Each structure stands twice: as C-alpha cells, then as structure tokens.
Image: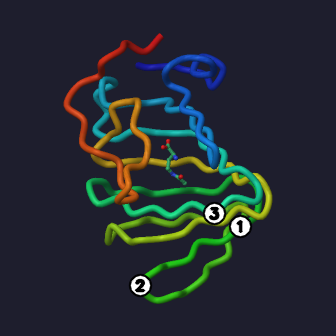
Amino acid sequence: MIVRRLRDAQGTSREVDTPNWVSRRLLLRDDGMGFSLHDTTIRAGTETWMQYLNHLEAVYCVSGRGEIEVVASGERIPIEDGTVYALDQHDEHVLRAETDLRMVCVFNPPLVGPEVHGEDGAYPILEAVEDGHA
Ligand code: 9YT
C-alpha cells in the first residue's frame, strides 16, 4: 500500500509550479497504479488553453468557481465544488478560474512527473524520469 500526504509532495519534484497553476502530483507512473493522481490549484483570474492529445483526463473540482469552454462547440460550462469533467475525446478546452479552483485530476496513461504543456496544449509521453522523486 502506498500512503502519501500532500505535504510530502510540496517543495519536491512532485510539485510543478507554473504561472497559471500549481500541481502536486501525488501518484505517478512509477507508483504502478496505471493512472496518475494530482491535487491541482488553478490560479484565480487565469485562462488556460489545453488539449491532451496523448492522455485521457478526469477533473473533479473540490473548491472554487470557474468555467470550462469546449472549443469545438463554444459551449461554456460552469465549474464549482462537486463538478467533474472527463476529457474522453481529447477535447480542446479553455479553463477559466474566477477564484482559485482546487481540482483533483486523474490521467491515463499516468504522468511521469515533470510534464508541462507543450505548444500543442498537450503533455508529451515521457519514457523515463530523469530525476528521482524525493
Ligand atoms: C485541471 C488541470 O489543469 N489539469 C491538469 C493537471 C495539472 N495541471 C497537472 O498536474 O499537470
């Protein structure tokens, strides 16, 4: 059994901090679960364009307020505590945070660790972790 706490990830390579979001990647590929699990805060006032061409992702909002725009249709869906969205079509989307949005995210295949968005809005498929996770 794996037991890990948010504080164990903070300040380590499991914490990825970008201008729009900070993510604590609690479970990664090396943990062998077949998915990765992240505690992500999307910063208030930000707008992030994404398209996970190489992954499926489910996102469960546990606090905050914002919206997701589905680029293909222009539909804008409000997000609040208790909302889950699953990007089952590799959907191109824009996430807007009105307040800080705290999200629990699951990726399949699992992230390896250091991924950040490429110019295509996706995370690459990485083969190996170059630095260990403290
Ligand atoms: C909602 C969202 O941005 N999900 C992506 C996960 C997070 N940014 C991460 O850990 O990369």
Which is more N-terminal, label 1 or label 3?
A: 3
Which residue sits at x=35%, y=48%?
123
According to the picture, the residue beneath numbered tag 3 turns out to be 47
Sequence-wise, the earlier of marks 2 and 3 is: 3
Tag 1: amino acid: Gly
Q: Is residue 130 above or below residue 92?
A: above
Residue 110, image x, y percentages: 32, 40
Residue 66's disc is 1
Residues packed near mark 1 inside 10 Å, few (<14), some (14 to 19) or many (20 plus): many
Position of the N terminus, as image quadrant, is top left
* Residue found 35% across the figure and 59% down from its top: 120
Q: Is mark 3 within 8 Å of ligand 1?
A: no
Q: Which residue is mark 2?
A: 72
Number of residues whose C-alpha sits closer than 10 Å to that of mark 3, classed few (under 14), some (14–19) or many (20 or more)? some
Say if 112 sits above or below 110 in the image.
above
What element does badge 1 sit on?
Answer: strand
94 or 78: which is nearer to us?
Answer: 94
Residue 28 spot, x, y in % from top left: 38, 30
Q: CA distance from mark 2 to mark 1?
A: 19 Å
Look at discs 2 and 1 and give the one toward the viewer: 2
SS state under label 2: loop
User: Going 68% across and 75% down the picture, which residue do you hit?
Assistant: 78
Task: Tell us which disc is closer to us: 3 or 1.
Answer: 3
Q: Is residue 76 above or below residue 56?
A: below
